[in-house]
Amino acid sequence: MKLKKMLATAVLVLGTSLTASAAHVSFGINVGTPPPPPLVAVGPVGVAPGPGYVWVDGYWDWVGGKWVWVPGAWVLPPRPHAVWVVPHYHPYHDHYHYHHGYWR
């Protein structure tokens, strides 16, 4: 019984720490080609729909094995003072390493 309780506590602590650290880590994938040039970005469209909203510019995202344009939008960050880290890529051997955007 004591072993089960210790194991459950260890799983809970590990799961909590992994969840907390995952919120601050970007992951990358390898893709064959860089994204196309950005579409014309005009900046924020209209006014924020409410307090706390921030404008996130449009960007190319790697979805289902191809580049897909995600248009700019007003978004509510997941927590106060969160900062959007834009997606980016860099050459890596004979392909590109792509990092999805994330909130930090």
Image (spheres, rainbow, N blue to C red):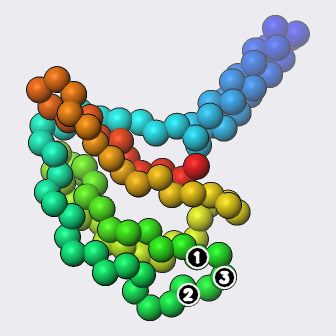
Residue 48 in view (yes/no): yes
Determine whether the residue tagged by mark 2 lies in a helix, strand or loop: loop
The answer to whether residue 87 is left or right of residue 79 is: left
Residue 8 in view (yes/no): no
- Give the percent coordinates (x, y) of residue 26: 46, 39
Determine whether the residue tagged by mark 1 lies in a helix, strand or loop: loop
The answer to whether residue 22 is left or right of residue 46 is: right
Residues at discs 2 and 3 in contact (Cβ within 8 Å): no
Residues at discs 3 and 1 in contact (Cβ within 8 Å): yes
Q: Determine which residue is flagged by label 2.
A: 49
- Give the percent coordinates (x, y) of residue 15: 66, 30
Q: Quadrant of residue 11?
A: top right
Q: Determine which residue is flagged by label 3.
A: 51
Amino acid beneath label 3: Pro
Graded by Cα atoms within 10 Å as few (under 14), some (14 to 19) or many (20 or more), the crowding at tag 2 reads few
Q: Quadrant of residue 14?
A: top right
Between 25 and 39, the residue placed more toward the observer is 39
Graded by Cα atoms within 10 Å as few (under 14), some (14 to 19) or many (20 or more), the crowding at tag 1 reads some
Between 10 and 87, the residue placed more toward the observer is 87
Graded by Cα atoms within 10 Å as few (under 14), some (14 to 19) or many (20 or more), the crowding at tag 3 reads few
Q: Determine which residue is flagged by label 1.
A: 53
